[in-house]
Structures are given as C-alpha cells and as structure tokens.
Image (cartoon, helix red, strand yellow):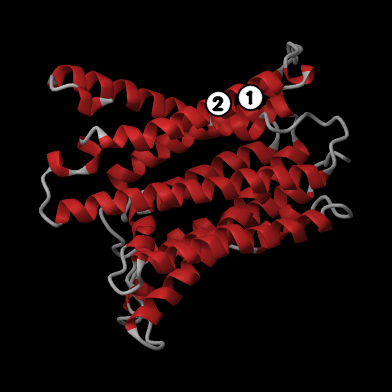
C-alpha cells in the first residue's frame, strides 16, 4: 500500500507496520509446527510424518519463490533502474500481493473456524513445567544444536539461496523445473517412502535424518565457496544446471533432516513441551544469529570457513573450517546419543 501515498512519513509507517506483521508471522512458524500435532493421544507416527513433510515441503517452495523475487529486484537495481522504476514502488504491486494476502487470510479463517473442539479446550496446568523441561537431555541438546547451526550457517544463508537464481547460463525456466522436480517430485517420493516405513518403525525418520550427517553444511559449502561456480561437465548451461540440481538435492536432504529432528521432539515430549522448546530455541537462535553477524569468521563472506577447494587444498589447513565442520557433525551425533536413551511415545 506504500505506493498509494506520496508522503514519506506515511509511507514509512506503512512499511513499519508491514515489517512488524512480517516479523510476527515469521516468529509464529514454531507454533504452527508444534500445534499441528496433538499430544500423545494415540496419533499414528505416519500422520506425524505426513504433516511434518507437508509443512516443510510447502515452506521450501514459498522460500524459493521469495528468493526469486529478491534476485529479480537485485538484478533490476544492478542494471541501473532507479528505485522509483521498480515494480515494488508501483501501485501495480498491489494487484499481485493483495490477492495473495486475501487468499492466506481466507485459509487462516477456514482453519480457525474448522478446528475441532480438541484445540479449543483450555490446557491444564503442568506442575514443575520448566524444571522438568530443562532436565530433559533431548531439549538441552536441541538448544545446543540451534546455537551451533545458527552461529556458523546463518550469516551466509542469503548468499547460499542467491546461488540458486544467480546463473547467467541456466535460464530461469530450467531452474523452475529443478525446483518442481526436487521440492515437489522428489519430496513427494520421500514423503511416500518414509510415511510407509513409519507404519512399522516410528523411529525410522529420526534415525534416517541423523544418518544424513550435515547436509546443510554441505549445501552452504557448495553454494557459496565457489566450487559450484564452474562444473566442467558439458556446456556452461549444463554445468550450471547440474550444479543447481546438486544444490536442490542437498536442500531436500536438509529438509528431511529438519523433519527428523522435529519428530524426535514429537516422540519424546508432549505438545506443550514442544511448543515451548521451539519458541525458546527461536530466541536462542536469534541471539546466535546476532552474534554470528558480529563475530563469526564467515560473517562477511565464506572466508576460511567455506574454502574453494576447486582452487586447491589450502583451505584444509584452516582452523575455522574444521571447527565449523566438527560443530555440524556433532549435531546429529548428539541427537543419536540422547535419542537412543529417550523414552518414546508409542503411537
């Protein structure tokens, strides 16, 4: 709505309100995940797997679309267009964003009115809630994992996503096909296989996600270090296409691991404990991100944390590279240690 006013003060307040709504909506993601699952009232693990995969998969598609939008605006700005000439400064943007906003509000209204009575009842009081929660090793390790991942991997997050849309050789439609193949096709196949296996083994997704190691670290290394800038297989377009195909594959593995870690919480904690754990982890993660922007070795670029091994093996001698790798490998190893000793809910 900003383009409809010429007063800079009014436009600034419109942008401030929009930013506040965006921040509140972004912060509600943990609640959306936690409260999508009932407490341990006999819910099949297959239902948990299906819901978690749908949430994570749809989020991947939405984030990819947002980064395409951002990369398009950046390219227009780099081409010399003034800010007033961009689509975001034109009333035409309202014709794009308003229908999307109305659709999302309509979905929210339908969900709110269609919730069963189970979600409308007042929760009971849990004695010694915080004391009991912080005695759970799975919760403490989840907080540690959030700090380790956010400190080392949050600073290059934007640069990592920009790699997907930054190719001058692979056309945009080919990247779109890649996204649909991996984030819809491959993700649906993974959803089907893991959902079927969860019928007999409720622990299959957590153990499989632990066995993936550090796919997010691998994806960031591939996307920002410069290794993927030139893939010498076929033409430049083919190399760019294959490089982004590997990036999408690692993104799918990272999403599966995120789902697995979420199901670890669902299988070891009640719904109330999961909601608080995710909210508190969000606060800790924000503090770790702030600290990373101020002090992490990769705060302003890949640096020695993500060296370009395509230029040589000098990066192997960097202490920051090994510390980052050790921290990311420690995350699934720690989950394996605490998960195997936890008492699981028997759906």
Residue in the picture at 35% in, 64% down: 224
Which x, y percent locates residue 259? Answer: 65, 49
Which x, y percent locates residue 298? Answer: 32, 55
Residue in the picture at 83% in, 42% down: 344
Question: Is the residue 71 above or below the residue 104 in the image?
Answer: below
- Sort mark 2 into few (<14), some (14-19) or many (20+) by Cα contacts within 10 Å: few
Q: Which mark is residue 323?
A: none
Q: Which mark is residue 110?
A: 1
Which x, y percent locates residue 212? Answer: 63, 63
Dots 2, 1 in contact, CB < 8 A: yes
Q: Please give the residue where the numbered disc 2 appears in the rendered image.
A: 106
Residue in the picture at 37% in, 50% down: 67
Q: In this view of the protein, which residue sits in the foreground, 27 or 61?
A: 61
In the picture, residue 43 is in which quadrant?
top right
Q: Say whether residue 261 is visible.
A: no
Q: Secondary structure at mark 2?
A: helix
In the picture, residue 286 is in which quadrant?
top left
């Amino acid at each position: 709505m900003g383009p409809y006013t010429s007063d800079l003060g009014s436009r600034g307040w419109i942008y401030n309100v929009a930013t506040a709504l965006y921040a509140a909506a972004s912060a509600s993601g943990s609640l959306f995940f936690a409260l999508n699952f009932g407490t341990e009232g006999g819910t099949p693990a297959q239902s948990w797997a299906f819901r978690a995969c749908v949430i994570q998969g749809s989020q991947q598609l939405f984030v990819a679309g947002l980064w395409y939008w951002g990369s398009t605006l950046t390219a227009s700005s780099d081409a010399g267009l003034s800010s007033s000439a961009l689509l975001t400064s034109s009333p035409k943007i309202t014709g794009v964003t308003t229908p999307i906003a109305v659709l999302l509000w309509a979905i929210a209204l339908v969900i709110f009115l269609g919730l069963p009575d189970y979600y409308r009842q007042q929760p009971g009081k849990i004695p010694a809630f915080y004391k009991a929660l912080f005695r759970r090793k799975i919760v403490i390790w989840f907080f540690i994992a959030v700090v380790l991942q956010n400190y080392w991997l949050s600073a290059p997050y934007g640069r990592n996503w920009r790699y997907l849309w930054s190719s001058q050789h692979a056309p945009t439609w080919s990247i779109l096909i890649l996204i649909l193949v991996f984030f819809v096709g491959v993700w649906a196949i993974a959803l089907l296989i893991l959902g079927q296996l969860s019928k007999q083994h409720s622990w299959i997704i957590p153990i499989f996600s632990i066995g993936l190691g550090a796919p997010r670290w691998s994806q960031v290394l591939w996307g920002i270090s410069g290794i993927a800038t030139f893939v010498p297989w076929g033409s430049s377009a083919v190399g760019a296409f294959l490089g982004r195909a590997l990036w999408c594959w690692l993104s799918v593995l990272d999403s599966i691991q995120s789902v697995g870690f979420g199901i670890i919480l669902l299988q070891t904690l009640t719904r109330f404990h999961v909601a608080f754990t995710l909210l508190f982890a969000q606060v800790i993660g924000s503090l770790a991100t702030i600290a990373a922007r101020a002090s992490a070795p990769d705060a302003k670029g890949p640096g020695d944390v993500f060296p370009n091994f395509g230029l040589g093996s000098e990066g192997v001698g960097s202490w920051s590279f090994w510390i980052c790798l050790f921290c990311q490998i420690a995350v699934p190893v720690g989950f394996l240690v605490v998960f195997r000793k936890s008492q699981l809910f028997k759906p």
